[in-house]
Structures are given as structure tokens and as C-alpha cells.
Image (spheres, rainbow, N blue to C red):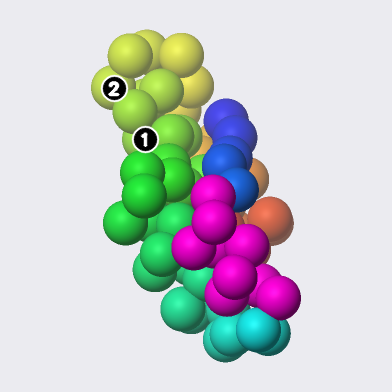
């Protein structure tokens, strides 16, 4: 499971301006970022991992 944020100009500008994390996250999601949780549950549907493992990783990593 992974969460990957691809930097683009909008996100870079928000980071430089020290925008709130929620604003950066919303911009990242709008530009296609896949969250740790969504990647994990996709892998559950593919039979690669279990719901329990996703929950353990997401809550340990603080992902959403």
C-alpha cells in the first residue's frame, strides 16, 4: 500500500504559502492523488491484502 503525492504547480504554491494541510490535501485529491486507505481497499478487492491489514497500516500511519 502506498500514498503518492505528485507535485504540481498548484500544490507547490500552496506549500510555499504555508497553506493549511487540508487545503494542500484537497488540491492533491482534486489532481488525482490516491490515498493510503483507497489504495489499500483497492488491494483488498484485488485479493492482495486483507481489511485488517489495511486498517492496521492506515491507523498506524495516520492515513485517510
**Residue at 54% of width from left, 50% of height from top?**
8
Front position in the image: 42 or 20? 20
Looking at the rendered structure, the secondary structure element under dot 2 is helix
Q: What span is colored magenta in the figure?
A: 8-16
Q: Is residue 34 left or right of residue 59?
A: left
**Residue at 68% of width from left, 55% of height from top?**
61
In the rendered view, would you say 48 is above or below 62?
above
Q: Please state the horizontal and vertical placement of residue 39, each as a whole percent of the image.
A: 43, 34
Give the residue number, with chain letter if any, for mark 2: 45
Q: Please state the horizontal and vertical placement of residue 32, each as a whole percent of the image.
A: 36, 44
Q: Is residue 46 left or right of residue 21?
A: left
Front position in the image: 62 or 22? 22
Front position in the image: 44 or 42? 42
Asked if the magenta segment contains residue 21, the reply would be: no
Q: Main secondary structure of the magenta part?
A: helix
**Residue at 37% of width from left, 13% of height from top?**
47
Give the residue number, with chain letter if any, for mark 1: 41
Looking at the rendered structure, the secondary structure element under dot 1 is helix
Amino acid at each position: 500500500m502506498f500514498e503518492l503525492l505528485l507535485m504540481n504547480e498548484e500544490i507547490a504554491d500552496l506549500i510555499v504559502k504555508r497553506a493549511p494541510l487540508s487545503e494542500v490535501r484537497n488540491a492533491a485529491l482534486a489532481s488525482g492523488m490516491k490515498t493510503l486507505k483507497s489504495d489499500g481497499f483497492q488491494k483488498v478487492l484485488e485479493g492482495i491484502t486483507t481489511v485488517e491489514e489495511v486498517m492496521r497500516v492506515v491507523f498506524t500511519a495516520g492515513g485517510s
